[in-house]
Image (cartoon, rainbow, N blue to C red):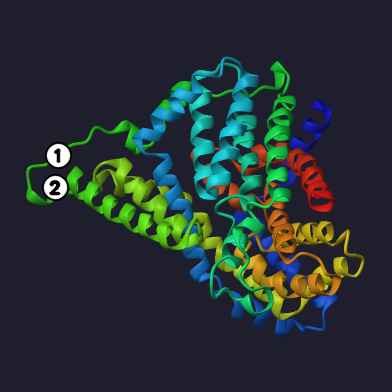
Amino acid sequence: MKAVINLSNSIMQRFLPDPFLFVIILTFVVFGLGLGLTDSSTIEMVQFWGEGFWGLLEFSMQMVLVLVTGHVLASSPIFKKVLGGLASFAKSPGAAIILVTLVSMLASWINWGFGLVIGALFAKELAKKVQNVDYRLLIASAYSGFVVWHGGFSGSIPLSIATEGHPFQDALGVISTSETIFAPFNIAIVVSLFIVLPILNRFMMPSKDKTITVDPEILNQDQDLQAATVEMVGNTPAERLENSRIASMLTGLLGIIFLIYYFVNTGFNLNLNIVNFLFLFLGILFHGTPQRFLEAVQNAIKGGAGIVIQFPFYAGIMGMMTLSGLAAVMSEAFINISNDFTFPLFAFISAGIVNIFVPSGGGQWAVQAPIMVDAALALDVSLAKTAMAVAWGDAWTNMIQPFWALPALAIAGLKAKDIMGYCVIVLFISGIFISLGLLFL
């Protein structure tokens, strides 16, 4: 295991570029594949790229809000205390690795943005309290929990197809989350990963001579503004209003009342907008005053900078893949070797490959849904399971797609290549259990 991990880390340290350069390289890779595998000309590929460049603006805003609201909630004082209390349970480096994996997985299953942020914050808290724990593996373990997000409450594909008026309603209808997120096969996959990943991460601990630790004092100096500042209330009416707990309480209460009304009238029907709404108003309540809430938002938005600047490039890639027919070529290659038994597996693998080029659950579903739905109907395979196979494929290869690691890396102060060697191992092992669940359950 140590030899494999050392090799994986060495390769990633040497060859993995910055995520922005990664998306530039992917752009030209897709450009070349489009020329080679479709009938598109050079000018047409440029046209497809430019026409698609702004195609994900609405979805990008939703994703940024998921990240920001999750970050704001995770950095609130009440959650800081909870994380500090949890960290005190880890008495050894191995216990710290297991604990951060479990906490990150649970948080990611609840909300992907929340999981990314709270996992990294908890990892930093553990690094302050536990001696001789490898900081890179600690952050990698926190990120590894992200693999379950699309099987949880914020999974964009199952939430999208559960929403009235979604783009593929004519073909799919509206599929309840009881058939996707809460289906027995999906719950079994999630539970198996909750057992396997903490053990796997624990076994990846490097030997003492290769362990890289970090000085707790450095981490203490890099605390969030929310944890380091003392609330100062000025004398002007405007400053008193900015630091008024009453304003936050009333605003938060208004949001909670609406949520109660929503769930009473629609049942436990989660979608992206409701998840964002919930985290936003809990964040307003938990931060206590408008001023502290806005400071937390400013800190959170820094982590979203990569999403803002890189999503248009991924939208351009998506434009090339869809308009040139390249995504269809990739998907159909797997469909052609599928039958009614193997189709969920090949849908999962094809989605994992497409996700490398289109790392957006909603964006990827827009690319693959028409092809996968037609194939599922022709093979008489469950549409709900087909959607979840694509969802798991999207989540799976995020382990080697550095784009979504950006918020955690920003919090930890690391580079993508510092953790990706560990994440490659997680990719292979988690892929086995997801595949078994899709095939046999």
Q: Residue at x 60, y 39 (%)?
A: 105
Q: Position of residue 73 (x, y in %)?
A: 40, 44
Q: Is 159 placed left or right of 422 in the picture?
A: left
Give residue 120's position: percent from left, percent from top. Answer: 53, 37
Question: Along the line of sight, which residue is nearer the eye, 324 or 244?
Answer: 244
Residue at horizontal 65 percent and vertical 71 percent from the top: 366
Left or right of residue 158: residue 263? left
Residue 41, picture quadrant: bottom right
Label 2: element kind: helix
Pointers 1 and 2 in contact (CB under 8 A)?
A: yes
Of the numbered discs in the image, which one, if any, rests on residue 233?
Answer: 1
- Quarter of the image containing the N terminus? top right
Judge whether 121 appears above or below 279 on screen.
Answer: above
Foreground pick, 363 / 31 = 363
Q: Is residue 86 above or below residue 22?
A: above
Q: CA distance from mark 1 to mark 2?
A: 6 Å
Residue 367 position by quadrant: bottom right
Q: Which residue is at the front of the view, 329 or 275?
A: 275
**Which residue is disc 2 drawn over?**
239
User: Closer to the N terminus: mark 1 or mark 2?
Assistant: 1
Q: Position of residue 318 (x, y in %)?
A: 66, 71
**Amino acid type, label 1:** Val
